[in-house]
Image (cartoon, coloured by chain):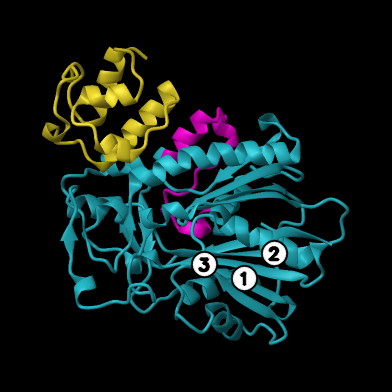
Chain colours: A yellow, B cyan
């Protein structure tokens, strides 16, 4: 999955239009970034990159790019 | 002697909490969103005065009515519950009396959640193969709704109350019908799915009944059920594939040798993710929770009952059961389905 595809999948799970996320967005500014979206993101990283994310690690992320980095999405 | 599953019945309380009811209470979540994430259309909720033993007695009475067994043939009662009628006495003792099961039977409760059915099968297999019992009633019964805050949609959308009763009979056979088993435990996760107060560690006080709101807007007190969904999901993603690997290795079988996979019915989203991750074909995978939600230790027997009713369990099928959850605790077992089963 490319970075763009990953961003679009993340946009789907936080109920934003595809293309709305670029990376620098602050997670606390995304209204639908909640525990349910976290679970969907864990599933996304697991399914596509076989990366096992820890919720504690995710809580330290402040931007979308931070999340993509720990999910090992190619820059 | 070997233990064989010879009948399963279940009982759900009359009160129903539909997804439409929840969407009306939580307007930020639509019916489609709840259904899409959980795969649950309705949950049955015990009445105020309806306890685990009441659900259990009803489930077992259905076994008796089906002709699978009668009270006087039962020589052991195993009850898996985390919402017992009392701290003490043992709820299985109350059930023995209410059902008219002979006083010569053994009875015990064991406290496990979503892995409980696997552990119960292991206990029943041990009792029967060692000659300690011939007809074991394995009952799973929960009223988690009594722990759940009405304003906590994170758990209210998922859990439903219910009970299942499985009859395990001693059968002369060289090869086992149930097994091998694998088990797993990791108490480091105990705080991620917990009712924090009400036991001896943290007794209830005026303060424990004070509600607080989390960052997602869910309200609960320290006397309510708390679930850290993300942590539990992460645990599941590691424990389930590992359990499957271990049990296949122990049984010297491959994925292709398994005819049907019955996992704990946590929620459809999680099940579908696990199914795809493990490359399990849809026709070999059971999802049976839309009518009752996550009934904790009863989900596997309920799913087995539905699979049998739908003709998905022909004689000699090899079935893999996997339970996982609160504790953390997990386990898996293989079942060789037999024509001893009475549908």
Residue B248 % position (x, y): 69, 37
Residue A33 % position (x, y): 20, 36
Is B303 on the left-hand or right-hand side of B18? Answer: right
Instruction: State the residue position of label 3.
Output: B111
- Asked whether residue B36 appears in the rendered view, the answer is no
Identify the image quadrant of the C terminus of chain B. Answer: bottom right
Instruction: State the residue position of label 1.
Output: B78
Instruction: State the residue position of label 2.
Output: B124
Quarter assignment of residue A10:
top left
Quarter assignment of residue B281:
top right
For the residue pair B20 and B85, the one nearer the viewer reads as B85
Is A70 on the left-hand or right-hand side of B65? Answer: left
Residue B285 % position (x, y): 56, 38
- Report in which chain the residue with disc 2 lies: B
Label 2 or label 3, whichever comes before in sequence order: 3
Q: Is residue B233 above or below residue B224?
A: above
Label 2 or label 1, whichever comes before in sequence order: 1
């Amino acid at each position: 999955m490319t970075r763009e595809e990953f961003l679009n999948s993340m946009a789907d799970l936080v109920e934003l239009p595809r293309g709305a996320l670029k990376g620098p967005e602050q997670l606390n500014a995304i209204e639908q970034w909640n525990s349910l979206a976290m679970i969907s993101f864990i599933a996304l990283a697991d399914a596509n990159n076989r990366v096992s994310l820890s919720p504690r690690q995710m809580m330290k992320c402040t931007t979308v790019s931070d999340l993509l980095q720990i999910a090992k999405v190619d820059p | 002697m070997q233990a064989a599953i010879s009948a399963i019945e279940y009982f759900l309380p009359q009160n129903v909490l539909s997804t439409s009811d929840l969407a009306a209470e939580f307007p930020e979540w639509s019916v489609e969103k709840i259904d899409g994430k959980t795969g649950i259309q309705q949950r049955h909720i015990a009445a105020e005065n309806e306890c685990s033993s009441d659900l259990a007695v009803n489930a077992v009475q259905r076994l008796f009515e089906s002709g699978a067994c009668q009270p006087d043939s039962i020589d052991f009662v195993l009850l898996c519950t985390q919402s017992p009628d009392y701290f003490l006495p043992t709820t299985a003792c109350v059930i023995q009396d209410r059902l008219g099961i002979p006083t010569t039977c053994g009875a015990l409760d064991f406290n496990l959640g979503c892995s409980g059915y696997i552990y119960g099968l292991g206990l029943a297999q041990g009792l029967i193969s060692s000659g300690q019992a011939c007809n074991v009633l394995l009952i799973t019964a929960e009223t988690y709704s009594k722990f759940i805050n009405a304003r906590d949609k994170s758990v209210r959308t998922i859990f439903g109350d219910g009970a299942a009763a499985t009859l395990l009979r001693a059968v002369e056979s060289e090869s086992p019908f149930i097994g091998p088993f694998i088990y797993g435990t990791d108490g480091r996760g105990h705080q991620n799915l917990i009712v924090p107060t009400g036991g001896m560690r943290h007794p209830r006080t005026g303060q424990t009944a004070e509600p607080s709101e989390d960052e997602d807007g869910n309200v609960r007190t320290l006397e309510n059920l708390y679930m850290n969904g993300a942590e539990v999901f992460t645990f599941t993603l590691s424990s389930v594939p590992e359990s499957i690997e271990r049990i296949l290795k122990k049984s010297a079988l491959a994925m292709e040798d398994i005819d049907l996979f019955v996992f704990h019915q946590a929620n459809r989203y999680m099940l579908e993710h696990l199914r795809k991750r493990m490359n399990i074909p849809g026709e070999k995978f059971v999802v049976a929770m839309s009518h009752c939600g996550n009934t904790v230790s009863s989900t596997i027997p309920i799913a087995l009952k539905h699979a049998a009713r739908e003709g998905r369990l022909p004689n000699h099928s090899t079935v893999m059961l996997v339970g996982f959850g609160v504790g953390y605790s997990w386990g898996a077992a293989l079942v060789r389905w037999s024509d001893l089963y009475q549908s």
